[in-house]
Image: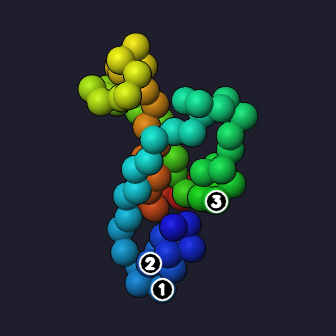
């Protein structure tokens, strides 16, 4: 996924936005996205989840938005 994102950015000049559930919701030490998308703008936003096999785990979670605009970090 990161390879394709970078290819579209560098070779095509596309404006890109990627969203993904933040893995630190489950493992606070998980830095996969920070490493894979180093140099891109990564924002954590709060998202509501109404579906989960465990009812008590429904609710707000952190979601990642990764963009190659407005500026790279």
Residue 56 picture location, percent across and down: 40, 13
The local secondary structure at tag 3 comes to helix
Between discs 3 and 1, the one toward the N terminus? 1
**Whether residue 43 is visible:** no
At x 60%, y 51%, the residue is 33
**Display colour scheme:** rainbow
Mark 2: few/some/many CA within 10 Å (<14, 14-19, 20+): some
The quadrant holding residue 72 is bottom right
In the picture, measured across the screen, residue 33 lies left or right of residue 21, that is: right
> What mark, if any, has residue 8 been given in the picture?
2
Find the distance from the CA under tag 1 to the CA under tag 2.
Answer: 6 Å
Q: Between residues 37 and 47, which one lies in front from this camera angle?
A: 47
At x 68%, y 40%, the residue is 30
Are the residues at dot 1 and dot 2 in contact (C-beta closer than 8 Å)?
yes
The quadrant holding residue 18 is bottom left
Q: Nearer the viewer, mark 3 or mark 1?
A: 3
In the picture, measured across the screen, residue 1 lies left or right of residue 53, that is: right
Q: Nearer the viewer, mark 3 or mark 2?
A: 3
The local secondary structure at tag 1 comes to helix
Residue 29 picture location, percent across and down: 72, 34
Residue furthest toward the top? 56
Tag 1 residue: 11
Is residue 58 positioned above or below 17 on the image?
above
At x 57%, y 73%, the residue is 3
Tag 3 residue: 36
**Whether residue 2 is visible:** yes
At x 38%, y 64%, the residue is 16
Residue 69 picture location, percent across and down: 42, 59
């Amino acid at each position: 996924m990161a390879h394709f994102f970078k290819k579209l950015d560098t070779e095509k000049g596309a404006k890109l936005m990627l969203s993904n559930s933040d893995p630190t919701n489950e493992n606070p030490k998980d830095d996969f996205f920070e490493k894979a998308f180093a140099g891109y703008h990564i924002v954590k936003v709060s998202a509501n989840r109404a579906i989960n096999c465990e009812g008590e785990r429904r609710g707000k979670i952190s979601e990642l938005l990764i963009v190659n605009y407005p500026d790279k970090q």
